[in-house]
Image: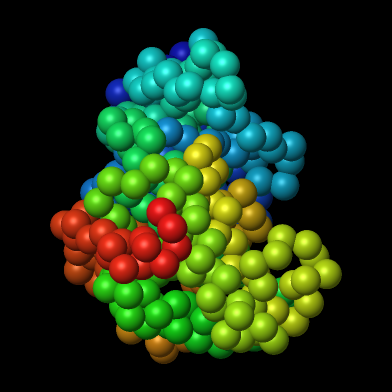
Amino acid sequence: MLARDGSVEFAGVRLTHPDRVLYPDQGITKLALAEYYAAIKDWALPHLANRPLSLVRCPEGQGKECFYQKHATPAVPKVVGRVQIPEGTGTGTGTYTYIKDLAGLIAMVQMGVLEIHPWGSTVKRLETPDIVTFDFDPDLGLPWERVTEAAIEMREALLGIGLRSFAKTTGGKGLHVVVPLAPKLDWDAIKEFAKWVAERFVKAYPDRFTSNMAKRARTGRIFIDYLRNGRGATAIGAYSARARPGATVATPLFWEEVEKGITPDRFTVATVPARLMKIKADPWAEMPKLRQSISPRVRREIGI
């Protein structure tokens, strides 16, 4: 229902300027982005909800000025959850946002959020992460096959230490390999584990991989970013749009799709709802059910 001021109510949230174009090349409006999230909510909320967030807000749309936001302000809609998180070395805390339900997801659209980046832990277990993310970020010009091969090799290496993993596109030029864990270890231990895995890869294939952030170290290589597993660090959320040309979406994949070389540019705000209707099964269906842990042998080797 269109109000006098031009706003509409959507999933209980007032959307102002619903016809504002957020993705100019595709003509995707604010209302269309809300409709996207409503269409995929059952797939997205298990991975986006109940986690502290860092947000990329682009109030005027993709290609215009964007900014990061970690802390809640009074302007954040009331349907968005708030959680107090200790910060720094003192006794101070910051108020972070989290999504509770569809209304919270639509409130992100109202705020002009084009990217949702969740923590690897939940608001109930802040200090014990349950997700490890390995971000495979290729140097410019590397063929996509190099990225898919790397992700598959990482899957096999993780299986070798007893851990199942899942894949998703980043909405950019890379892939994420995601490992769910029972929330037992603290952030420092999880980061050490991620570093250990990444550095084993680099040692085995120094001409193909680097774990060094420096641009010069990435030449002709894939950067394995394990730093997304530190406290307060985030990774793009499953089914989140990106603030990029093309309105691409970070999309969970079946491993069979990775093996076939499926490319990330086909997953967009416009195409992902139809994909989910077509595939029916959830590529990440098993993820919430897994209660796997890093083995005592591996923990001893790393020293965590």
Q: Quadrant of the C terminus?
A: bottom left
Q: What is the x, y in percent for residue 107?
A: 42, 28
Q: Residue furthest right?
A: 216
The structure residue drawn at horizontal position 31% and vertical position 68%, both measured from the top left corner, is 297
Q: What is the x, y in percent for residue 238?
A: 40, 54
Judging depth in this view, the residue of 193 and 182 nearest the camera is 193
Q: What is the x, y in percent for residue 175?
A: 51, 69
Q: Where is residue 273, by image quadrant?
A: bottom left
Judging depth in this view, the residue of 293 and 39 nearest the camera is 293
Residue 33 visible to the viewer: no
Residue 230 visible to the viewer: yes
Q: What is the x, y in percent for residue 4?
A: 46, 14
Lateral position of residue 73 relative to residue 153, left or right: right
Judging depth in this view, the residue of 247 and 76 nearest the camera is 76
Q: Residue furthest left?
A: 289
Residue 79 vertical placement versus 285 (above, below)? above
State the count of labels: 0
Q: Quadrant of the N terminus?
A: top left
Q: Where is residue 217, by image quadrant?
A: bottom right
Lateral position of residue 116 relative to residue 51, left or right: right
The structure residue drawn at horizontal position 59% and vertical position 24%, both measured from the top left corner, is 88
